[in-house]
Image: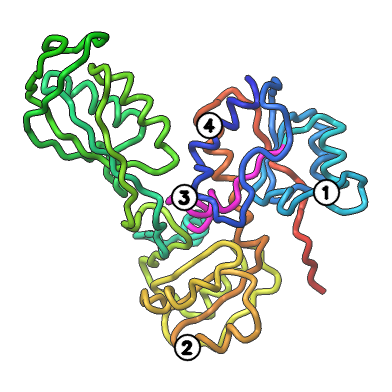
Amino acid sequence: MKLKDLCSYLDSAVPLSFQEVYDNSGLQIGSPEREISSTIITLDVTEEVIDEAIAHKCDVLVSHHPLIFHPIKSLTGKSFTERILYKAVKNDIAVYSAHTSLDVLSNGVSSKMAEKIGLEEISVLSPSENKLLKLVTYIPESHLEVVRNALFEAGAGVIGNYDQCGFAASGTGSFRGNEITNPFRGEKGKIHFEKEIRFETILFSHLKDKVIKVLLEAHPYEEVAYDLYSLENKNAGTGLGCIGKFHNPVSENDFLKMVSLVFEAKGVRYSKPTGKLVRKVALCGGSGVSLLNLAISSGADAFLTADIKYHDFFNTENKILLVDAGHFETEKFSGEILKDLIIKKFPKFAVRFSEINTNPINYF
């Protein structure tokens, strides 16, 4: 298949519109028209991972962290990023990165962390905002099912764990075509009244072009009337961090042991123990301390994340056990999510995990 086929799928499965404004998710290196046959999945793109791809004759690297995060003004090999870029381009290896787009998926990085430690009743900690649109259109009664089903098939109508969500109300529409029209019903130059259905549904903003294209194709009218509204609703199905519960609560000490074991974290840092059992846990892969107050207000007994600064540990005020297991460690399972997505769509495409430990932090 071509690189653009893989990128197009990942761009929709891990929507680029979900990424944070500072991020650079998506295709980093490579010609979309190039034929590809195999990929290596990695958390970070390093020179060693590029060498690994060369050795295994892999065409694509799919990473969590972007290789290109800041503008590149030259390609001389003087910096870490430039050396990797130069080697990747020279050896015709494409690079695609997911990063914060993958972080906010309902089954994304934080959810995978929760799954690994056995949490139940998992939900989003900080739901996404300003990612939803409402579509309103007017359909002749005879074509309601056809148009509605086409919109749902294109991805519209999803609210949390429900899909095919919409609302329909009957009414009467009017129109008059000029001499160059070919009206679906009625005559040129004469006003026509048609029994129509006002149909409303919602969609993620990244699906807008796809949904409107399908609407215009499925709708019988020459000129299709529709409105799009930006919604301020929070979307409970996507967002940063997550929260879940243990079926049986554990001691704080046992929780710390579990974190160290599951994430292979050699230097777990934590705040002053509260002395309470840990039943409800908030999590955020990578740098998630900005969600600390949300974790506390949600009633979590512990908050597991990374990159916590010295003074942040004071802010727990004995309300929650704050745990830093490391950036690499909390995001190390992101590759499993990406592999499952790719294999689901392209079952015959060769996918392998990188065997390189890309963690830049060492412990003495």
Residue 304 inside the magenta-drawn segment: no
On the image, the x and y values in percent for residue 247 come to 36, 66
Q: CA distance from mark 2 to mark 4?
A: 45 Å
Real-space Cα separation, disc 1 to disc 3, in angstroms: 33 Å
Count how many numbered circles sit on residues in the image. Answer: 4
Residue contact at pointers 3 and 2, CB within 8 angstroms = no
Q: Quarter of the image holding residue 55? A: top right
Q: Which residue is drawn at the image coordinates 41% and 30% (left, top)?
A: 210
Amino acid on which the number 4 mark rests in the picture? Tyr
Residue at disc 4, secondary structure: helix
Q: Which residues are magenta?
A: 95-110
Task: Name which of mark 1 and mark 3 comes first in the sequence.
Answer: 1
Circle 4: is it few (<14), some (14-19), or many (20+) Cα within 10 Å?
some
Relative to 231, residue 182 above or below: above
The amino acid marked with disc number 1 is Lys
Q: Are marks 1 and 3 in contact (CB under 8 Å)?
A: no
Q: Which mark is residue 9?
A: 4
| Viewer-side label of 1, 3 | 1
* Marks 1 & 2, CB-CB < 8 Å contact: no
Q: Nearer the viewer, mark 3 or mark 2?
A: 3
Q: Residue at the spot x=27%, y=17% of the render?
A: 222
Mark 1 / mark 2, whichever is N-terminal: 1
Between 212 and 339, the one nearer to me in the picture? 212
Quadrant in which the N terminus is drawn: top right
Front label number (2 vs 4)? 4
Q: Which mark is residue 73?
A: 1
Q: Circle 3 is placed at which residue position?
A: 105
Instruction: Kindly identify which numbered label has been placed on residue 342.
Output: none
- Mark drawn on residue 274: 2
